[in-house]
Image: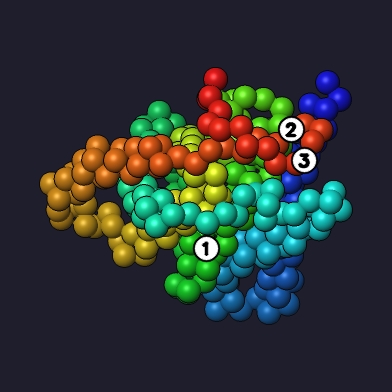
């Protein structure tokens, strides 16, 4: 029981580190602008407040990513471990790279369907999600790419498919490890509609890690998914859907029923033998393909 509690505490620590850094930055920025508005009180400052806070939300994502990474690396070093080894930063084959990129560019369509279906049942949740996404979108395109498109996927994969996945696999079966990390990934987004979509996404990300034994696979999937999401939002994809509904339907069908399944099948068929790390022994041992159950 003690070892399971220690695992739960380690997972909670990893999550809190990232969450607290982001919250502290946003609170600091809000406090600064609150003081500034209280002193100046100009109409121009009030009008620019939303845009300024949107920039700081994106900056908070970057700061939290960098800060968390440095703390995680220090924590691993204190335990005599290597962060890159623990998170499985290993090379992918060219085929695995292509398949991961295709999954990232097509799973977004499945995510949109899940998000909208959840929104039908819980409309307020979808409305809150749209509002949250709107607070991140800034006129600074490079800042959006750096934060939502790059920093967020990198640190979230290190956190969930790296550190948390590693903690879970030491204590339970691979099937439960993939399910639990996906659920935690969903819960972390703190919005029912977004959390449901993220949890499903977490399954794909977990499987890609398991099949390739490299965190670069889920990083590529996550990174491309986020870049496309931000890009479609900036380009006004909803307007395209209204103008060309049949083209949009064809894109959804090809992505979900052809490209995505074939890409997942490729990763499965070219899967790499999984290296399991024991609870008390951190020495790597080749054990072949582990069953999911």
CA separation in Å, label 1 and label 2: 32 Å
| Label 1: how many Cα within 10 Å (few below 14, some 14–19, many 20+) | many
Q: Quadrant of residue 27?
A: bottom right
Q: Which mark is residue 150?
A: 1
Q: Secondary structure at mark 3?
A: loop
Position in image of residue 179 (x %, y %): 55, 29
Residue 12 in percent (x, y) is at: 75, 39
Q: Position of residue 126 (x, y in %)?
A: 44, 41
- Residue linked to disc 3: 282
Q: Quadrant of the N terminus?
A: top right
Q: Which of pointers 1 and 2 lies earlier in the amino acid sequence?
A: 1
Residue drawn at 55 percent across, 20 percent down: 293
Q: Which mark is residue 278?
A: 2
Observer-nearest of 26 and 64: 64
Q: Residue at x 27, y 54 (%)?
A: 238
Q: CA distance from mark 3 to mark 1?
A: 31 Å
Alpha carbon separation for disc pair 3 and 2: 6 Å
């Amino acid at each position: 029981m003690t070892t399971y509690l220690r695992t739960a505490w380690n997972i909670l620590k990893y999550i809190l580190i990232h969450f607290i850094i982001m919250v502290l930055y946003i609170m600091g920025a809000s406090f600064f602008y609150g003081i500034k508005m209280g002193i100046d009180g100009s109409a121009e400052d009030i009008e620019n407040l939303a845009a300024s806070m949107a920039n700081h939300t994106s900056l908070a994502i970057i700061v939290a990513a960098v800060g968390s990474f440095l703390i995680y690396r220090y924590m691993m070093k204190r335990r005599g471990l290597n962060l890159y080894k623990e998170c499985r930063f290993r090379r992918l084959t060219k085929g695995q790279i292509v398949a991961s990129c295709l999954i990232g560019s097509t799973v977004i369509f499945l995510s949109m369907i899940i998000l909208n279906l959840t929104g039908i049942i819980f409309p307020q949740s979808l409305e809150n999600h749209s509002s949250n996404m709107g607070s991140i979108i800034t006129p600074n395109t490079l800042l959006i790419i750096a934060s939502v498109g790059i920093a967020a996927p990198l640190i979230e994969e290190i956190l969930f498919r790296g550190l948390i996945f590693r903690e879970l696999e030491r204590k339970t079966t691979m099937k439960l490890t993939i399910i639990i990390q996906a659920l935690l990934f969903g819960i972390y987004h703190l919005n029912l509609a977004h959390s449901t979509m993220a949890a499903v996404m977490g399954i794909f990300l977990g499987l890609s890690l398991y099949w390739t034994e490299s965190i670069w696979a889920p990083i590529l999937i996550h990174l491309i998914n986020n870049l496309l999401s931000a890009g479609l939002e900036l380009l006004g994809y909803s307007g395209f859907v209204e103008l060309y509904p049949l083209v949009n339907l064809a894109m959804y069908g090809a992505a979900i029923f052809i490209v995505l399944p074939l890409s997942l099948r490729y990763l499965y068929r070219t899967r790499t033998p999984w290296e399991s790390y024991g609870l008390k022994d951190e020495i790597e041992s080749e054990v072949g393909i582990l069953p999911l159950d």
